[in-house]
Image (cartoon, rainbow, N blue to C red):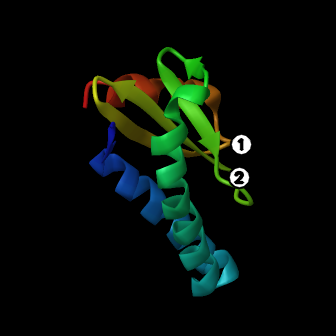
Amino acid sequence: MRKLRILPEVTEDTAEAAEWYDRCGGKALGDRFLDVFYSYLPKILLDADIHRPVYRQFKRILIKPFPYAVYFRIHQEWVVVTLVWHTARNPEKLKELLDGRQRS
């Protein structure tokens, strides 16, 4: 059975998104974003193999209803959650971040 590893940078990614939702939609919306993100982690762990790579070895799952994606990769017995990214952001920056976090 694989284990889940969440890079420390992912905590920063989710905190930044939740803070934005707190400012724009109130604390309840920021909390909802975090709840939805954490509810997807078991799905990522259980279904990691069914997702196809979207960039190098990184796979992606969209966390609906929010416009965010969770990027992860399989490394030995680990499913490594690498990045939480707003889907409207620059895809070149996305690739740069994924390449940098691949080393973690």
Tag 1–tag 2 contact (CB < 8 Å):
yes
The residue to which callout 1 is attached is 88
Q: Residues within 10 Å of mark 1 (few under 14, many from 20)?
A: few
> Which residue reaches farthest top?
56
Up/down of 103 relative to 78, above or below: above
Between disc 1 and disc 2, the foreground one is 2
- Residue 104, given in percent of the width and then of the height, sits at 25, 32
- Identify the residue at horizontal 71%, vertical 56% (top origin): 64
Toward which corner of the image does residue 87 lie, by quadrant? top right
* Location of residue 89 in the rendering, given as x and y in whole percent from the top left corner: 65, 40
Q: Is 59 or 15 nearer to us in this picture?
A: 59
Q: Residues within 10 Å of mark 2 (few under 14, many from 20)?
A: few
Q: Nearer the viewer, residue 94 or 83?
A: 83
**Residue 96: horizontal and vertical position, in percent?**
46, 25
In the drawing, does residue 55 fall left or right of residue 90?
Answer: left
| Observer able to see residue 99 | yes
Q: Secondary structure at mark 2?
A: loop
Q: Position of residue 68 (x, y in %)?
A: 64, 50
Residue receiving disc 2: 67
Residue at horizontal 52%, vertical 27%?
49
First along the sequence among labels 1 and 2: 2
Image quadrant occupied by the N terminus: top left
